[in-house]
Image (cartoon, rainbow, N blue to C red):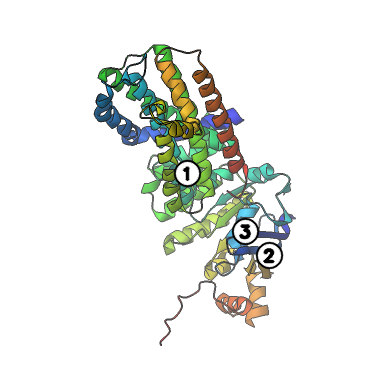
């Protein structure tokens, strides 16, 4: 059953230099309980798509439903059904972990007592119990990310959107985060829609990949199906597969200096 | 829900203000300096027929406090945009209007508190004014800060570059202060300057507060002041609401 489906979802930004089509028309479906890796080179429209699906940005074309709620007609329903962790996270470094978690609960209309309980629950579940009274600014990168995810899980959303969740994390914290994402799906049936630049991450974590380039979906399938089809064999690396699909690397190397 | 959400957002930002006590007091420094080092220069001057120079200067300083303080309120949301706090809140079901109103009411609280400090200092310097008039003055400070902080938050939400915010606000506040006669009554000046200042909404506010400070409550200036202050607040909150409601901001 599709929990997210989009048809021709598009966003054009008006700029001084004329219109910029960040997303030209995305058609995709995500099944309930799936971990979907949303890949693409820088500027492919990943974050713009995510911001549209989470109601932060109004689409300029197309339609989408998230967890049975129409994006245009019922944005409030979409908000109640999904959680979102932006690349930058979203906590105030001056505030304690507990205060942020409780405020988040209250923003989701929990009572004061229930919000306090929920903060404790989330902290236990995400290994933040010892850190509740610390300021958010005093957390390590991995702890911060777990807090960001805890905030997004406050209302037990059906769908969790993660925008480059492991960027800037050390290998240990990345592995922890992968475990966390799998656990969320296995224990709570949460559908996870994540963007990433790391192909090993996409390979290890996703049930299915959707690859976007230039604001449209250029390929989709399981990692092995994509490798077979575009990389030539099951043993092909996802790096080669990605290059074959987009003609570019997912993590563009800095342009080599040109000798003159 | 709007009340619940507004109270929640207000509480969050009021706690933020209380955490930085220094910033809370710092805002009152500029008008306090005017009070200490500029105020005494006026004591011998015939500024009004029925009023002491303090009854003319203090209303102006109160509105100056609101004008400069609240106009820069948007800076906090620029920081929060960078931290991702704004988007994090916007994906929750919280009322969009509450995200504005809670912040704006925080500003009103902070600036009325600073206004009280300023008036207490002014009393020590020699201000004598009726209590009702002083309270009316705080009411005008509250309305002015609601208006200006709503506009400031709206501008900050719209601007994509934080670098543009400070200069834009500065360019608007300085002439507003000078043309509104906050320091000295514009009626002292030449007719063209007096005329120009009537195009400034703050001119009507300061005239009304000056009337209140001498105990004249039923005057034409008071009526205009109340109407302009309410109109400005309604306009500003409408603009702010539109910006906060639009998804792409």
Q: Residues within 10 Å of mark 1 (few under 14, many from 20)?
A: some
Give the structural element (helix, strand or loop) at label 2. strand
Q: Are marks 3 and 2 in contact (CB under 8 Å)?
A: no
Residues indicated by labels 3 and 1 sit on the same polypeptide chain: no
A96 to A230, vertically: above or below: above
Which residue matches tag 1? B77
Give the structural element (helix, strand or loop) at label 1. helix
> Number of numbered discs present?
3
Q: Are marks 3 and 1 in contact (CB under 8 Å)?
A: no
Q: Are marks 2 and 1 in contact (CB under 8 Å)?
A: no
Give the position of the N terminus of chain A as an image quadrant. Answer: bottom right
Marks 2 and 1, how far apart at CA: 31 Å
Marks 3 and 1, how far apart at CA: 23 Å
Marks 3 and 2, how far apart at CA: 14 Å
Which residue matches tag 3? A14
Outermost residue, bottom direction? A260
Q: Nearer the viewer, residue B1 or A181?
A: B1
Q: Position of residue B47 (x, y in %)?
A: 34, 21
A234 to A131, vertically: above or below: below
């Amino acid at each position: 059953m599709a929990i997210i489906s989009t048809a021709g979802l598009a966003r054009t930004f008006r700029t001084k230099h004329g219109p910029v089509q960040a997303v030209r028309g995305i058609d995709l479906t995500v099944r309930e309980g799936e971990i979907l890796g949303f890949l693409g080179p820088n500027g492919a429209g990943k974050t713009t798509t995510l911001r549209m699906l989470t109601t932060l940005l109004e689409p300029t074309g197309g339609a989408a439903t998230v967890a049975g709620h129409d994006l245009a007609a019922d944005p409030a329903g979409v908000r109640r059904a999904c959680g979102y962790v932006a690349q930058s996270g979203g906590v105030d470094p001056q505030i304690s972990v507990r205060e942020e978690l409780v405020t988040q609960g209250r923003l989701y209309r929990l009572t004061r007592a229930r919000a306090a309980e929920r903060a404790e629950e989330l902290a236990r579940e995400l290994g933040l119990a010892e850190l509740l009274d610390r300021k958010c600014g005093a957390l390590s990168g991995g702890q911060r990310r777990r807090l960001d995810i805890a905030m997004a899980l406050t209302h037990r959303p059906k769908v969790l959107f993660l925008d480059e969740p492991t960027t800037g994390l050390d290998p240990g914290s990345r592995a922890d985060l992968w475990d966390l994402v799998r656990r969320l799906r296995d224990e709570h049936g949460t559908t996870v829609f994540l963007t990433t630049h790391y192909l090993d991450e996409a390979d290890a974590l996703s049930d299915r990949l959707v690859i976007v380039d230039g604001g449209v979906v250029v390929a989709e399938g399981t990692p092995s199906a994509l490798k077979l089809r575009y990389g030539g064999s099951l043993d092909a690396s996802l790096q080669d597969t990605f290059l074959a699909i987009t003609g570019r690397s997912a993590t563009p190397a800095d342009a080599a200096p040109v000798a003159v | 829900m709007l009340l619940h959400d507004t109270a929640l957002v207000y509480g969050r930002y009021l706690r933020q203000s209380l955490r930085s006590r220094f910033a809370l007091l710092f805002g009152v420094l500029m008008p306090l300096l005017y009070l200490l080092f500029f105020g005494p220069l006026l004591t011998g001057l015939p500024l009004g027929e029925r009023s002491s120079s303090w009854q003319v200067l203090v209303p102006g300083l109160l509105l100056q406090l609101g004008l400069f303080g609240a106009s820069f309120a948007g800076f906090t949301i620029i920081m929060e945009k960078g931290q991702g706090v704004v988007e994090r809140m916007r994906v929750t079901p919280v009322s969009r209007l509450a995200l504005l109103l809670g912040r704006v009411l925080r500003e009103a609280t902070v600036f009325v508190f600073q206004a009280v400090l300023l008036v207490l200092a002014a009393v020590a310097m020699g201000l004598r004014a009726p209590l009702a008039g002083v309270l009316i003055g705080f009411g005008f400070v509250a309305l002015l800060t609601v208006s200006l902080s709503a506009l400031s938050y709206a501008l900050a939400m719209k601007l994509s570059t934080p670098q543009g915010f400070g200069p834009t606000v500065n360019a608007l506040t300085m002439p507003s202060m000078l043309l509104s006669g906050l320091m000295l009554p514009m009626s002292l000046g030449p007719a063209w300057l007096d005329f120009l200042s009537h195009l400034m909404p703050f001119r009507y506010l300061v005239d009304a507060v000056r009337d209140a400070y001498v105990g004249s409550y039923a005057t034409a200036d008071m009526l205009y002041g109340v109407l302009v202050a309410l109109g400005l607040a309604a306009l500003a909150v409408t603009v702010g609401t539109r910006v906060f409601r639009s998804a792409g901001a």
